Structure formats: structure tokens, C-alpha cells
Amino acid sequence: MRYSAFQILKQGLTGNKGWTPVWRNPTPKAEYDVIIIGGGGHGLATAYYLAKNHGLSNIAVLERGYLGGGNVGRNTTIVRANYHLNGNSEFYSHSLKLWEGLEQELNYNAMMSQRGVINLCHSDGQFDFYAERGNRIRAQGDDAELLDREGVKKHAPFLNFSNERFPIRGGLLQRRGGTARHDAVAWGFARGADMRGVDLIQNCEVTGIDITAGRVTGVQTTRGAIRAKRVGMAVAGRSSQVGQMAGLRLPIESHVLQAFVTEGLKPIIPGVITFGVGHFYISQSDKGGLVFGGDIDGYNSYAARGNMPIMEHVMEAGMAMMPALGKARVLRGWGGIVDMTMDGSPIIDKTPVEGLFFNGGWNYGGFKATPASGWCFAHLIATGNHSEHATKLLMNRFATGHVLDEERTGAQPNKH
Amino acid sequence: MSRLPKGGLIDRSRSIPFSFDGATLTGHPGDTLASALLANDVRLVGRSFKYHRPRGILSAGSEEPNALVELGEGAARLPNTRATTQELFAGLVATSQNRWPSLKRDILAVNDLMAPFFGAGFYYKTFMWPKRFWESVYEPIIRRAAGLGRLSGLPDPDHYDKGFLHCDLLVIGAGPAGLMAALAAGRAGARVILADEAAQMGGRLLAERLELGGSAGHEWAAGVAAELASLPNVRLMPRTAVTGAYDHGAFGALERVADHLAAARGAPRQIFWRIQSRRAILAGGAIERPIAFANNDRPGIMLAGAVRRYINQYGAAPGARVAVFANSDEGARSVVDLQAAGVEVTALIDARPDAKAPDGVPHFAGALVTNTRGRLGLKSVTIRTASGGVETIAADCLAMSGGWNPNVHLTCHQNARPVWRDDIAAFVAPDGAVPGLVAAGAAAGAFSTHAALQTGLDAAKAALTDLGLKSGKTPLPKAEDAPCDLTPLWHVAGKGRAWLDFQNDVTVKDVKQAHAENFIPVEHLKRYTTLGMATDQGKLSNIAGLAIMAELTGRSIPEVGTTTYRPPYVPVQIAALGAHGEGQGFAPHRQTPSDALSRERGASWLEAGLWHRAAWYPQTGESFWRQSCEREVGWVRNAVGICDVTTLGKIDIQGPDAAAFLDFVYTNTMSTLKPNRVRYGLMLREDGTVMDDGTCARLGAAHFVITTTTAAAGPVMAHLEFVAQVLCPRLDVQMVSVTEQWAQFAIAGPKSRELLNGLLDAQVDNDSFPYMGCGPVSLGGVAARLFRISFSGEHAYELAVPARYGDSLARLLVARADALGGGLYGMEALNVLRIEKGHITHAEIDGRYSAFDISMPRMVAAGKDCIGKAMAARPGMVEPARPQLVGLKPAGVVKHLKAGAIMVEVDGAPVREQIKGHVTSACFSPTLGHPIALAYVAGGVARIGDTIRAVDLLGGVDTLCEIVALPFYDPEGGRLRG
Amino acid sequence: MHLNCPLCGPRDLREFSYLGAARLMARPDADDQAAMVDYVHYRDNPAGENAELWQHDYGCRAWLHVLRNTVTHEVLSVALARDKALEAEQ
């Protein structure tokens, strides 16, 4: 069913009885050309682009819970392309371009809203660093503006400019950055994949990966064995467990990242504002809730929930930079399990097992990568070659020394 | 007036004024805003989120979805305040929200007419054409229409606090179960905290007409509370909501200290407590559930338990002619209470065909409410009787009860799911889901008063046993023990919209549509329809929503499952959770020993880690920072300058194996360093990247003092402790950070020795303190340390004294320097001096560069292992294309050099693929008379003399540069040694 | 979260900082490049019991070897990392 204002009108006038399932509930087939493990944003996008860009149709996405139930359903919905390093820069740039046409591409309104992302800075050193980053962003072909204190004041007048502990020196603004409705991104890709014949199989947990003579032959699942010529992993925080099924040890730690939303409020926050010194970032959803978060809790965890110290620190940072937030009430906090790599950059690569491909290590920033991650992972799975947008996101970079240390903090994920 | 002539726990002797939407009204102490509004016949209090439907008060607790108001005015305005929990105070000002121009006439109520087109998820299917209209047209309209109340946009003017509490037993909720548990534990001597959301201890005992041990329920509660208050080991915390259950016995709790007062009078408005508890009992009661039937959202339709609370606790009648609709004995109980209060009951509609009729009320067993009338307030209800007949019953209030949901929230904060019990048609707390926490009373599904008391007592006894305490005798008072006699009823089939989530306007039809569109998993249902995402987080709506999905899919309710329970249990202001974060409170402010002196001298400040350091010291006639900076540079180059360098990390390292230890953590060798000598040192992270640089001074055979950069002082200390304790546990070495114990000043410039020799108790010369020499000195009898080291490139020293002499020494040094034609210099001058000398700071060693990159490959000593050496040897870390640190000076017409500019070949383009590096630090060199910069350039060391461009795309500056060798100034180092 | 520091007793999470897996105690021979790459960058990252290193940095500054469940956050044991390192040498 094609979605449009006309369709809504038509259904509305006929009692809304004609809506049809957005995707099927297929029974797993005995064999697929490609199996994607993980029905989150990246897995669904991969399936979509495998079908759309590469003409494959005998594809299954296996999801142990419900579609979009991983980090795509529990993030702070920020989209930006403001990376520093070769390898990341072109990848996220490609992603932002895909975001910009996503609704029309998917015929699904994911509400990509380009109201800007501003990173505040508080010292000359940080300002110089942002100047370098801004220049690199511009050299990549994306937009960046370095605002001084007055420029920031114009952009976000309600910030604390008078008695702040870390006086605002300026900010790096990317106007094309913004937010999107996270669930809708997963659903849009899922619907698009389903329409192209991809089997989306929920409540189907992968329990083993079948390997014969160094080559993947299929997977074991809670709904039986399924054969496959190629298997792609896109399981984020569960990468180490699924990887272990194929004997992989990964440069990844799983950490919990908390996020929060307030009760609905009339519009106050323009776009996304990040207060890096305080590890704090915030935006406002179209529904009116302030969506914000901070640093990871700092210890390995699969618990999908955090503790009070980081939660309080996030709130304190919010009060420090935006004292008007005080009267907003936190409605809900949650935790996601993020797959932190040792250099803070992701991996889209082959594995030592022939036919088994790995996508993971998205740290706390996988949401913005969703379209490009799917695009590039699909390219790798379909062609066996790396997409031109993701040539450096390699597994062996730790062995060769070509690490992509975006956060400059070394091999300690809780410092990223 | 709907104030009943008598009854209730309010203080009728006093009247207090308040206002709602500009109208001045009065209530009594003991009222909530909601009860006072009802007593004043105000029934329309809000508008719903999507359809802007007129709404009245639905509940009497924090789960209220409709009666949300803006409280107060100006900067103090607090949006989304529940009228049902806000206690009345004199002068309270409340305003309705999310309506325009007025509550009665709200333009956006037109949305209600558009409802057929505004069903679940309609926005995902449209607003996509033309593409650019999303940001410019559709989204701004949606954003304006969305949201509930308004933030003022001004800093929160109120005060908040945080604190820690510790106890043996935390009892959450002070109804019969919680009071009983606290009493038993308190008498047994346990350190007990009893917390309850409400102002008064008692829970449902305040709302019901029950007898306990022969006295009225609320009197029994008051008696227990009084005894608990008299026990020194018990802390009563009314107005305190426990918000979250965290790891290892930690709970978050919000105490509303002054929210009920007109003025806080110095007290914080709220305190966010972190309670560390060895055992905890959740006695948080249950929340009544509505029934979904057509137009069940009109003002006047209220939960039956709330109706009883308004009558019994507040003496306020929610209506003059009340109908009751229930599926359990809660209906009959409500009728009796209403009648006792003298309120006319127009009908009892009981969904159970076999329900017994109470006296004196038209009774409809097996009947259902199918529709209601009344635009701004309920006028009548339409029912379908057991025989299929349709009747209309006049009523301005409908009390409804669909049963009760135990308040399992906190027991599920650690990812557990509640357990379904068919006998009460409700989810109850799972066992052991939060270690140390058990549920009791209605929260555990024990609905009768007797069962609540009994389970509360049992839970306390079990906790006391765990705590190693003996339970005393605490007899149970006699109380009712009625069975739960309920027939599940989630919704009444029929035409029209039947609300599940009142605030978000989610109806049964939306659930049906979600089902039709295959958004069947409970999380899809929630996310697609927004069911349960309102300010009550689904407390009123979730179970009914998933019961309907269970019907549609032919599954049981537990098979459908619940969504995840997340803290906070009730929404909490960011100001409370972030108390003391505002303004200067956010982070410590570290001051240098020369802080006071620098302030006297009018310093401009900059942030370095948590330190505030003087950036420059303006003098009369200087209008621009560079004037001051260049004057200060000149002092150092030509006379003598004084700079506070206390912020650099100082670590004292001692022990027979100290030298061996340092050889392992530094890339270069420190064991060969002679006593009274200093060596520059480089440390790597284990991944081969430069971690930090600094000096290492050997004060004795087994005694070193090393320095770190300001920013790395903490991380380097932790790193050294890791290496010593974990990697080298056999080395006999000890270390301690002495950054704050020693005040340290740089004395730099050709006249530095002259200055020192006028100050020290014994003269120094090139023999006693050669370049890179160090040793003990004394001045005025104070033992000090002198290091002949230089960051500026001049003949220079650093002098360290115990921190208590820091201010005094700073003043002494500056007075001497002033007399010698120099003076204080700040960070800007320090930066220029070090760039002229090509010294690195964190702009160059920012965590991505190797010893190879900073052109110090020989700093990594051969013949020994050190941290990071192996990884630094990986091919990618040493390949020729890596950036290397070089100097730049302008070579063309454009002279401007800016840090952050990217390096591009003369004939290249500033595109990512062609970037050769970037400028890390830049300044105007007053010494050389032109701009200079440090930059990373690919293969840079081999390109000395080449030209290249530094391009600042952000500022539109393109500078042709010559690549030059470092340092710019005094490459032979003659000035250092002289 | 609480950790029971062997020197200081039970203390709140706020006093501690986390480094990573306890295998960082077992630094391989520096000449074994592959082993070093694995040591620095690769992790078992178990969902369940995890041996890990913490520092009591706002306390006694001891490095601690902690056995903790990453799914439930239950702490099973806390020992001085130095003692564990000496044990491992034997």
C-alpha cells in the first residue's frame, strides 16, 4: 500500500478499516541467499539495500525480539556528519545524504528534521580543535560553521551566558544535522525490505552459526536451522556473543548508555545542542519531549539500565548550561547496550569465516549511520568488495596500526 | 458549591484563596488543587494532547493524565503540574495549558473533527511532499500544536538539594501494609525509612471508610504514624516518592519539601535523596483502572476510588448526581460512601450479571455503559442492560472502576517483568527481581485491608530476620478481609471512540488499527500508537491496551506481555536531579597559589582542566590581548618573567625500584639520570600513542619527582599506579601526587638568575645549577626545590615551595621581576614562547600522534621495553605518509595563520582526499616579527623548505607557507645554557 | 552500585573508576606483536561473569580485581589487583 495524504483521506472516510499489514509474518524458509542477523536499524537497512541496490530477494532478517527493538529504538535520534578522520568522514557524509532523501525513498515519514546540531566549546584549545574539525567537514563537502560566543547567543539565547562554570567560547554548527523519528526509520526500512520480498522474521533468536571448512553454511535458531550462502551480523551490543558462535573475538566492549525524556513541552530547543565538557546533549522531539543524554555509565554491562551517578551528572550538566530546564520533569530514563570499539569507530568488514560478514562497533553513534551502514554492508555482502564510502572501517586496523581514534582517547572505551 | 457540609480531613476552620485561569477561588488546608477545584464546581480543567478534547479530573494521584496545569508565573512557572497531587496553599496560581485562546473555546479542538484522519501513526504516512515542506511548513505546525505546558525559558529561580540516606529497611508507601511493616521493624530497632508520596501517612485508609481495630482507618494510621515519629530509629518521609530501584540497594527518592508552601522560606523546594538500604518493602498500593467505552473521557467521568477519596478525605463531591460503573464490589462500596455523604446516586451499573444490589439505588446488573453525553461536562450516560435494552441515566459524574493494578513499577526497574494472576486479573510483582526488595499489600495483590496488614507484617519479619534483628510482638488490628470479586472488563464493544490513554488520545480503535497493520508486539503497539507514553507512563492505560491486543490476537494477557518499567516512578524535575549543577556549582574551580595576586593585577582568565589560569595581565593603555601578551613575551626574552606553573602535575616517586619503574613507563631511559639532574620524558599509551610529556627530576638515588601536563595529571597518576600495582607488583616503588602540595613558578629570562640570587639563601651559578640541573634550595629558611628547566627557551628556572608559601613567594618574585624590568606573564605569552621554541602541548599530542609524528622517534630508547613500544611499531604507526610536526611561516601575500587550518599542496584543492595535515598551534611571534605556526604535514620532516598552503575554509583564509624546521627561535639552544 | 573495597569497605560507585577486562593484568611479551595487539584491543566481553579492573580513585587508590556479572551487575568478589597479580606469577 502506498502512503499519501490521499490514502489517509480515503481510509479515514471508510472507517479506517482498509489498512493492511506493514510487513508480513513469514515462516522461515529452509534456505536463503543472505541471512542478516539482527532486525535493528542497521540490519533492516542492509536488507533493504541488498534488495534495492543489488537485486537480491531471497533474504531473511532474523530478529530475536521485535523489529527495531535494539538501539534504533532507544537512542537520542541525532543525525550529523561532523567527523574528523578519513574513513569516518566520507562514511557519515554519505549517510547524511541518504537521510536527506529517506522519506521519499521509503515512502515513509521518518521525520528527518534538519534543524541543526551545535557543539559548544569552552576554551581556545577546544575552539582550535573545532576549527580543524570544521575545516575537515567542509573539505568533505558537508556544511560547518564556527560560531563565536555572540553567534551561539543568537542561535540558543536560553543557554547560560552569565554565570556559567565553563564560559561558552563558541560553537561548531552543522545546519544540515538534526534528528529523526527513530522507530519510523526502522519501520520504514522494514516495510521497504518486506515490499521487496525480504522475509522479516521476529522472535527468532540465532543460537549458532554453522561453518563447514571455513565457510558459513547457515544458522541455528530458536525456530530451527536455516541454511544460507552468506550471513551478515548486525547485532550491535550483542556482537561479542554472536561473534563467539563463529569463533570470533572482537575489539568490542558492551556498555550501557542512558538517555532521558521529559514530559511534553511547547517548543524551546532549536535542533540539537551538545555541551561536550559536561557530556550532555539535548534536542526536542516533535511531540514536545526534551530528549537528552550524556556519557556511558563506564563499566561493561548488558543490563540495559543505568545507575544514578551518571544520570545525576547528566542532569547537573543540563542545569549548568540550560538553567531553564529546571522546571522540566524527567518522565523516563532508559539504557541501551552500545558496542564500543577500541578506537571509537565502527567496523564493516569480512570475517575470517568465508561468507560471514560483520557490521558493528557503532559506539554511541549508530543511529546516524543507519542508512549508510545498510548501504555499505549490503554492498560488501553482495559484491564481496568494500563500498567506496567504507574502505577504512576494517577489522584488522588494530593489527596494522591504522586505527581511527576519533575521540583521541586510545583503547579504553569508557573514555571515548 | 460542591463542598460537602461535613466530613473529610481538611481544616474547615481556615479558608485559603487561590486562582485558576484568573478566577479567584477558595479552599481549605488539606485540599489538593484538584479537590479544591471540585469543591468550587470547576470540572473542565484541561485539554487532551492530540484532539484537544475537554477534560476533567480523572484520578486523585500522581497518575493523573488530564488535570495538568501550569503552576505559578514568570520564571517560577512549572508546567504539567498535577492538580491531584499539588497541595493547596494561599495564593496558588494555576493556569490551564495546551489550549488557545481559552480552555472553553480551544481552536485546536477542530482536531477532534479530523479524528478519522488523525488515527494511529497517520504522520508516518504523509507530510512527505514536497520534500522541503517538512522543515518549513509541516513540522513547525506540528511542533506548535504538540507539547503540553510551557517552560518559561528563564533560569529556574528556586533552590533544590540532594543528599544521601542510609537505612536497614526502606518502606515505600504508608498505607496499611507499609505502616504495619514500618511499625514492626521500627519496634524491633531497625533503622527504618518510611516514605510516602502523600502529605499524610495512611494511603487508602484516608480515602476509605474502614475500621481498623475498632477505630476509623485514618485514626489508626495517625496513631501508628505518631508512634513511628516517636522512635529515634525511624525516619518518616511524607511527600516523598521513591523514584527508582538501582543496583545493590540504592533507591532514588524525591522529597517535595516546600512545594506545598507559598514560599520556601530558605528551604529547598525539593530534595533528591539517594537512599542506600539493606532491605526494602514496596507497599505502594495499587492504581485503579478505567474502563474503555465510547466517550469515556468527558469531564465528570472519574475513577471510583478517586470519587471516594474526594468525598471521604477532602469533603468535596465530584458531582451532584453520580452514576457508578464497575465490574467488582468497588461499585457497591462507592455507592455506600456517596450515599453516606448525602450525594445522590442515579445508578449502579455493574458489569457482573450476578452482582447483588445495594439498597436505595437503581441497580443494573450485567449492564454496560455504552456512551456518554455532555460537551464540557458529563450530562448523562447511556447503558445497555443485561436484557439488551438501552437506557439513558442522568449524571454529572460517573464513578468507574475496572479493577486495580498493583503498583509493581519499582520491582521491575531491573528489567524483570511482572507476573500475571488470573484470580485478580492483574500483574503482580515478580519475586526477587530487585535483590532485597519485596512487595506487600495491594502492590503484591493483597487487596483486602487485613491482607495488606498481614503481608506488610510478614515482609517486615522476613526483612528483620535477614538483618539479624528479632521481631517483637506487633499484633494485627482487626480489619475487613473481603475477597476480590471481579470479572475482567477492559472495554465495552460498540461504536465511537473509547479512550485508553486519555492524555495521548489513544483509543481502542487505534489498538485495532495497530493490530491490522501488524504492529502487534507490545512495544510496537506502544511506539506506533503512543499508548502509555503520556505523563503517567501507561499506569492507567497499558494493561487495558494489551488486554485488547490479547483479544485481537487470541492470546492471553501475559503472552502479550508488558513494556519495560523504567525510572522515575513519577516524573522528577531536572532541577532536583541536577541540584547544585547550575552556574558555578557544576564543577570544582581549582585556584592557583597566585590566584589572588593575579586578580589584583587584573588578569584575564582561561580554563585549563578545572583550573583557572591567568591568560594575560593587561596594563594601562593596552586595549587588545595581543598587546599585553607581546609585552609579556618581551619581558621573558629580554628581562625576566614569572609564571605560575603549579597546575602541572607533580608526582613524587620513591623506592629502590623507582628508576626501573620509570624506565618502563617512559620511552626514554631514566635510570641513567644522575641525582640533581632533570630529563625530558615522553610517555606512551599502551596503544603506542603519545600520552603525555614532562620532566623527570632525580632528587636522590631512589627519589624522583616527575611532572605531567596540567590536563593529564590525573590520568597519568592512575596509569602509573596501574603499572606499579598491576603490571609490576614486585617492584618496590611508591608514589603520590603532590601537585597541590607544591606551589611552583617559572622564572624565565636572561635576568632569572639575577632575580634568584637576590632571593635565595645561597647563591646559584652555572656549576651548582647547570641547564637541566635541580636540587634543594632555601629561601628565608624555607626548604624549596629549584629546577633549571625552560619551556620558554630562555635561561630559566622553576622554583617550588610548599603550597602554603605560594602566595607569598608569588608576590616576592613579582616584586623582584618588576624591579628588573619584567613581571608576571600569563598563558598566552607562555603559549607564544613555547611555539617559538617548537615545544608541544596537547594541541600537538592530542591523543592521536606517535613519537614518530612529533619528530621524536629517537625518544623511544632501543634495548628496553616500555609501555606502548610494541604498538608504536605497527606498520601504520610509522609509515612515511603519516603527519609529522614541522614549523610554518607565511611565504606569500596573506600572512594570517590560524590553528585548525588544513594543509593543502600549492596546486591542490581543499578536499578531504588531498588534505596533508593541519595547523595545530599558531601565533604572531613578536620575537621574529611575523606569524608562525606548528603543523602536522604528511612526511613533513623531509619537506623542510617546501611551500604548502594552510587553508581555513571556515574563515575563508588561504595562506601560502614555507615549511621550516623547529624550533623557530634559538635552534642551538645557547640562551638556555648561558 | 557498591563495591566492597578490601581496604576501605563498601563504597559507592561514585568513588571508583573502571578500566576494563582483568586480562589487562597479563601483559604479554612485547616481542610478540600479535599477542600485544590482542592484549591491547580485543576483549571477551562476556554477558555474565566478567573479571575486570577498577580503581578506588576517590579512596585508597588501590587497583581492584572485581568479579562482576555484566547482566545483573551482581558483584561476586573484590580483591586487590596487586595480590591477584602476584598470585598469577606463581
Image (spheres, coloured by chain):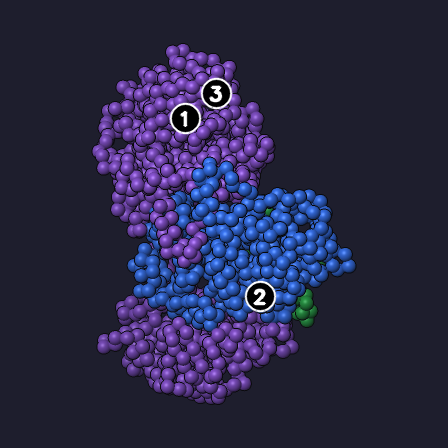
Chain colours: A blue, B purple, C green
Mark closer to the observer (3, 1): 1
Looking at numbered disc 1 in the image, what kind of residue is underneath it?
Asn
Tell me if mark 2 has few (under 14), some (14-19) or many (20+) residues whose alpha carbon lies within 10 angstroms of its own: many
**Gap between marks 3 and 1, in whole Å?**
15 Å
Total number of numbered discs in the rendering: 3
Mark closer to the observer (2, 1): 1
Looking at numbered disc 2 in the image, what kind of residue is underneath it?
Ala
For disc 3, the marked residue is B351
Disc on the earlier residue, 3 or 1: 3
Pinpoint residue A36: horizontal percent, then vertical percent. 64, 53
- Report in which chain the residue with disc 3 lies: B
Q: Marks 3 and 1: same chain?
A: yes
For disc 2, the marked residue is A390
Camera-side residue of B401 and B832 = B401
Pinpoint residue A333: horizontal percent, then vertical percent. 47, 46
Which residue shows up at 43% across the image and 25% down it? B370
Instruction: Say whether residue A35 is left or right of residue B224.
Output: right
Looking at numbered disc 3 in the image, what kind of residue is underneath it?
Ala
Camera-side residue of B926 and B225 = B926
Q: Is residue C17 above or below residue B544?
A: below
Camera-side residue of A173 and A28 = A28
